[in-house]
Amino acid sequence: QKEVEQNSGPLSVPEGAIASLNCTYSDRVSQSFFWYRQYSGKSPELIMSIYSNGDKEDGRFTAQLNKASQYVSLLIRDSQPSDSATYLCAVKNYGQNFVFGPGTRLSVLP
Amino acid sequence: DTEVTQTPKHLVMGMTNKKSLKCEQHMGHRAMYWYKQKAKKPPELMFVYSYEKLSINESVPSRFSPECPNSSLLNLHLHALQPEDSALYLCASSHDRGEVHFGPGTRLTVT
């Protein structure tokens, strides 16, 4: 079983819609959870971090964490063509081990 | 200063060459990372340094040799690489359980 899994893409949504990205992880002692956006040929850019159960909102982005279900999600409201990128879920546990999921490619269609 | 810098941006090397990748951060982070990323794949963890000591080595071949001279610097020494080692090499840093910040990467081509 992979440590971090994400819903397979590509995911296409129309401009202005909500994009929903999902991630599950296998290590129950994982402490910190992150969403990164990566444009082709560029390095990952941190969008959201979440450490406790519940929702965390930042502008058009909302991260949700459910540790009991080992599930993290990212919602992007009012999606824009500039949001088209690969979204990487990452999980950090004790000992600085920081692991990425395979990524979900998002296309926002004008 | 919230930036991780990496040099060089691009590197082309032959299989018999020795070269080094350099990474620097001035955010006071005590954990530093090297990742390798191939096209259309997620970053793959190679090494982690915590408080200047190597804490994780993900079974990386010995032709890759990391070095952490001080808390702000991280090097990756390369020797006798193979063409399949061509990739984007990413450096990152973080506080303990905090956010991991990435540098822009070094695009490595082995000929």
Image (cartoon, coloured by chain):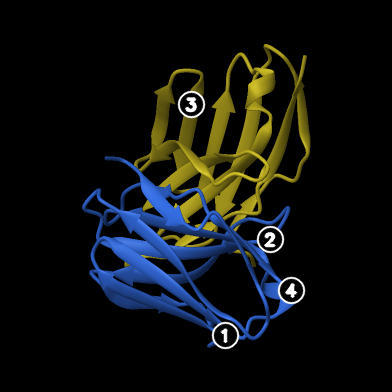
Chain colours: A yellow, B blue
Q: Which residue is mark 4?
A: B111
User: Is residue A70 visible in this depiction of the protein?
Assistant: no
Q: Is residue A4 above or below residue A63?
A: below
The type of residue carrying mark 4 is Thr
Q: Are marks 4 and 2 in contact (CB under 8 Å)?
A: no
Q: Which residue is mark 3?
A: A62
| Label 4 element class | loop
Image coords of residue B17 (percent x, y): 60, 82
Disc marking residue B61: 1
Chain letter, disc 1 residue: B
Q: Earlier in the sequence, mark 4 or mark 2?
A: 2
Image coords of residue A61 (percent x, y): 50, 24
| Label 1 element class | loop
Residue at the (66%, 35%) spot, across then down:
A85
Q: Are marks 1 and 2 on the same chain?
A: yes
In the displayed structure, does residue A32 sit left or right of residue B14?
left
Disc marking residue B78: none
Q: Earlier in the sequence, mark 1 or mark 2?
A: 2
Residue at the (57%, 27%) spot, across then down:
A75
Q: Which residue is mark 2?
A: B38
Q: Are marks 3 and 4 on the same chain?
A: no
Q: Which quarter shows the N terminus of chain A?
A: bottom right
Pick the residue in front: A90 or B38. B38
In the displayed structure, does residue A11 sit left or right of residue A87?
right
Q: Are marks 3 and 1 in contact (CB under 8 Å)?
A: no
Pick the residue in front: A49 or A46. A46
Chain letter, disc 4 residue: B
Alpha carbon distance from label 3 to label 1 = 40 Å
Closer to the observer: label 3 or label 1? Answer: 1
Pick the residue in front: A7 or B89. B89
The type of residue carrying mark 2 is Lys
